[in-house]
Amino acid sequence: MKEELYTIPVNDAFAADCECPLCAMRKELEQNAIEYTMGPSYMEDDNRALTDEQGFCMVHIKTLYEQNNRLGLALMLQTHMMKTTKDLKALSAKKPAGSGLLKKDKTTTPVWTYIQKKEENCFICNRVNHTFERYLHTIFHLWKKDKDFSSKFKNCKGFCTYHYGLLFETSKEYLKGSELDSFLNLLNEVYFDNMNRLAEDIEWFINKFDYRYQDEPWKNAKDALPRSIVKTNHTILDR
Ligand SMILES: [Zn+2]
Ligand SMILES: [Zn+2]
């Protein structure tokens, strides 16, 4: 089966006015996943089996609570809690042996293993991650095949540190030899140049708190803080 490519959202994100196109892609995917979760989908058995199993992470449960569908969320949490309780009741019957003077019991109980797995899972995160993987694949496909994309890549506003690292790390799975070499050279150039640009913006932002600079123009510094937060925390704040 031919693997699906997502050339439109990837091209759009690289053309967008954003400090990290990969963050922009994730944000879009996240918004879609939230709308999907709170839409009629939660009444479908397949989806409900997934939300019962995976639940939601700390970040996304807050986002879901802020949406306008308290009944939908209550229904999802009701059956999620029922499943958790049923599963844990079965697992908790197996109790640990405990520690003696000489030997500490360091085995993980099935209860804790189950709960840790639950902590790592989130219906929204999983949905986002699945498509994001395909977006990443598409970036390297476009890099190899599409000259216009390479120039978009070169002219974008750089990347957050996390996604710079992700591109650096995964490029070796998709490219080799001189192709990999020129990708990494450009990736480094785009990342470091744009970090420098932002460092200047944040410096000017700080200067503006000094009375000596009060009457100077803001230049590009007015939103330097939220833009820096994209670079440092791969987080696009809702403004
Ligand atoms: Zn990013
Ligand atoms: Zn999540």
Image: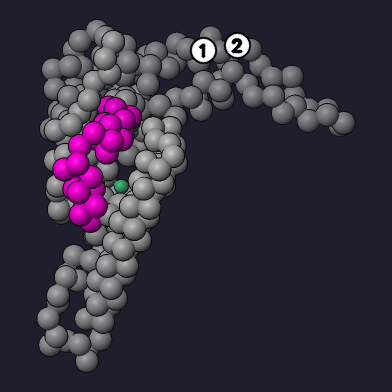
At horizontal 27% and vertical 38% (from top left) the residue drawn is: 143
How many tags in the picture? 2
Q: Which residue is mark 2?
A: 93
Q: Height in image: 152 above or below 116? A: below
Of the pair 138 and 89, the residue shown nearer to us: 138
Secondary structure under tag 2 reads loop
Q: Do the residues bearing badges 1 and 2 touch, measured as CB atoms within 8 Å? A: yes
- Apparent side of residue 52 relative to residue 208 in the rendered image (left or right): right
Instruction: Please check the rendered image and state whether residue 150 is part of the magenta-colored stretch, yes or no.
Output: yes
Which amino acid, by three-letter code, is at mark 1? Lys
Of the pair 137 and 181, the residue shown nearer to us: 181
Q: Height in image: 209 above or below 181? A: below
Q: Which residue is mark 1?
A: 89
Secondary structure under tag 1 reads helix
Of the pair 72 and 239, the residue shown nearer to us: 239
At horizontal 16% and vertical 39% (from top left) the residue drawn is: 11
Residue 124 x %, y %: 29, 28
At horizontal 26% and vertical 82% (from top left) the residue drawn is: 207
**Label 1 within 8 A of ligand 2 by Cβ:** no
Q: Height in image: 17 above or below 220? A: above
